[in-house]
Amino acid sequence: MPRAVAILLLAVSLRGCVAYEYEHEFWLHVDGSGTVNVTARPELWTAMKGLTAAQAADPDQARAAVRSVFEASGLRVQRVTLTHRAGRPYIFVAASFDDVNRLAGTPAFPDLALSLRRDGEHLRLAGTWRRPPGLPDPPPDARDGLMAVRLHLPSKVYAHRNAFAGVERGNIVGWRETVTEGLAGRPLEIGADLDARSILLSTVGLFAAAILAAATLVAAILFWVVRAGRAAGQKPA
């Protein structure tokens, strides 16, 4: 039994430590606003986002180009950094936006279209990641590994469209494929059905309902005690 538990814990930890060569990670709110992190090797920024080879080859130019593209697309950039993993450089950008529905087709997202629309009591998330045509291919040694689009959703997820690991930790869904598949033009089809109420709002509502129920019970008990006391006091001696 201890060995089985150790193996299970190892498997879970490894699953949570998948490293992507090209990744979009979104945190969405029910009103469509949110934040996004994009991390990718410079060659993949060129092949997927349209940075020039000269920009990708120079760290300072790459950071400046990424910031410029995101700000020109209406996002507020928090930071752009160059990191390294296993000796390879990665360009990372973190930015916020007011409406995820306005990102598609902007210079920052020529490859990704997302929409979040209300449908009664639900929100419908739909989208597609697809490599834009006409961009240069990276060298063969830069086509390994995995790529992904991952979303932290703001409310309960009722259904999803082929998320690779289902619903993770209650509200995370993701889609992934190999970099080779993405470079070849294979799209990632994104979709989910979620509650229109945020998890925070639902939690506050539950707490408020519990407090109201407790207050009602206490009031009922006090009323009964007072009434019983009056009835006892009115009995003839």
Image: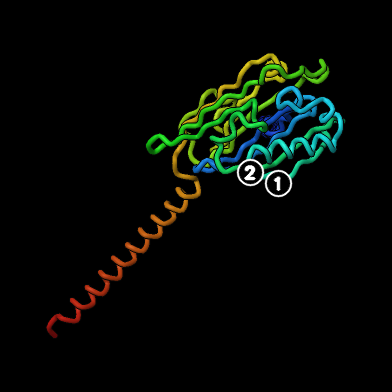
* Disc assigned to residue 96: 2
What percent of the width, then of the height, locates residue 150? 62, 32
Q: Name the residue under label 1.
A: 78
Q: Is residue 50 left or right of residue 237?
A: right
Q: In this picture, is 54 found above or below 29?
A: above
Q: In this picture, is 26 found above or below 182?
A: below
What percent of the width, then of the height, locates residue 202? 45, 48
Residue farthest to the bottom?
237
First along the sequence among labels 1 and 2: 1
Task: Work out whether residue 83 or residue 101 is closer to the camera in this orientation and state it.
Answer: 101
SS at mark 2 in the image: strand
Q: Quadrant of residue 146?
A: top right
Q: Which amino acid does label 2 sit on?
A: Ser
Q: In this view, does 144 lie to the left or right of 230?
A: right
What percent of the width, then of the height, locates residue 140? 81, 15
Q: Residue at 71% across / 46% down in the picture?
A: 78
SS at mark 1 in the image: strand
What percent of the width, then of the height, locates residue 20? 72, 28
